[in-house]
Amino acid sequence: MLSELKKSLRKLLKIFKRKKQIQLGFYGPVNAGKTTLANRISLDWLGKEVGTVSEVPHETRHVQKIENIVVTTNNGELRMNIVDMPGIATQVDYKSFKAFGMSEEEAKARAREATKGVIEAIKWLDNVDAVLVVLDSTQDPYTQVNVTIIGNLEARGIPMIIVANKIDLPEAQPESIANAFPQHVVVPISAATGENIEKLYEAIQEHLT
Amino acid sequence: MEIQLDFVSAETLARKGSAEKISFILDKIKRNIIVVLEEALEPQEEAELIEATMREIDTEEFHGIEFYRIDSRAKGLREKIAEYIAGRRHGLTIVGPTRLIEAIKREPDYISMLAKVDVPEEEKRKRGRKKKGGK
């Protein structure tokens, strides 16, 4: 009930207080391509990358903020700060990092940082105006982590767009993401190749500002 | 290896605040007990559960949880008010340690939980001998 009330209040405030610049959080499970997308946007509009991308899980272990991005679309200017979050997970086993050639000590240190990163990402939910939920279209979308992220944004009344990423891969099924979350706007893109990125900017402008 | 499942009634959960509920769940999980709650956790409680889990993870014994919420929550306003007054959220939540639960998956008609059972070395050897002997 309280969350319903909060949600309605947020919607009402939004009508009166349309922000010129939004704080846009990138949430999603581990290895969904959040940093690849942040890098793509930053490279396109600021001429620099912000984070390291790799196949090793939990590569992003700290919140990374990219400020004052101005994107020009067919509908005008879109001003935003991007906050690239560490991936949300319910488990971190240091042994999984050893498979990528890390020593025992390195793997344990990364595991400790990864757990802190997840906590930091959850805490940031209170500081974002809108969210891109970045999901991997080659994976089953109906996982508890995805449901928890989307459920928390709904409960807090934070507007969101679901980004069905990695559509350049042959096994991608962005339609399964749209079927799993029919109540939300889903934009299929490839952060790696830039496919459909213009549609994403337009969707942000239409639904999140 | 024995697997223990504890079923916790909605009445028991209704007596606990969110923080108490989370520590109650994690206490059991860390003792390798799979917990089935007779209520759907709220999304905020799920986030708190993940946060608390991350704080508890250590590199040796505890690597995290698997959980799944089966939601049959009220959708209409009248039902929501009734649920709020009754203090009960319909549904189930299954939570277990990753060392026991391999995966919980949603299938079209049911939820499937795959548990890991570590076979002790001695038992493995016995099974190996039986195979070789053809029995």
Image (spheres, rainbow, N blue to C red):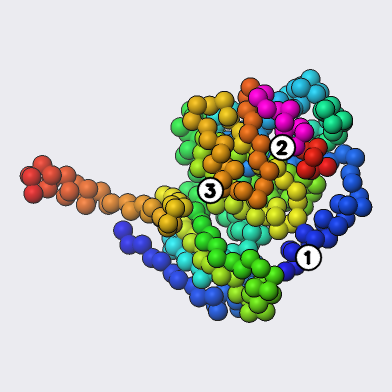
Residue under the point 61% across and 53% down: A148
**SS state under label 3:** loop
Please report whichever mark, 2 or 3, sits nearer to the chain's N-terminal start: 2
Residue at x 48%, y 48% (from the top left corner): B60
Pinpoint the chain carrying mark 3.
A
Q: Residue beneath label 3, please?
A: A142
| Residue picked out by circle 1 | A5
Which residue does the numbered mark 2 point to in the structure image?
Answer: A84
The residue drawn where x is 51% and y is 39% is A139
Quick one: SS at disc 2?
A: strand
Classify B60 as above or below B87: above
Same subunit under labels 1 and 3? yes
**Is A201 covered by the magenta stretch?**
yes
The mark nearer the N terminus, 1 or 2, is: 1
Res. B62 visible in picture: no
* Of the two numbered discs 2 and 3 in the rendering, the one whose residue sits closer to the viewer: 3
Of pointers 1 and 3, the one earlier in the residue sequence: 1
Among the 4 quarters of the image, the one containing residue A204: top right
* First to last magenta residue range: A194-203
Along the line of sight, which residue is nearer the eye, B6 or B90?
B90
Residue farthest toward the top in the current orientation of the protein? A47
Residue appearing at x 51%, y 57% in the figure? B68
- Chain letter of the residue beneath label 2 in the structure image: A
Query: Which chain is home to disc 1?
Result: A
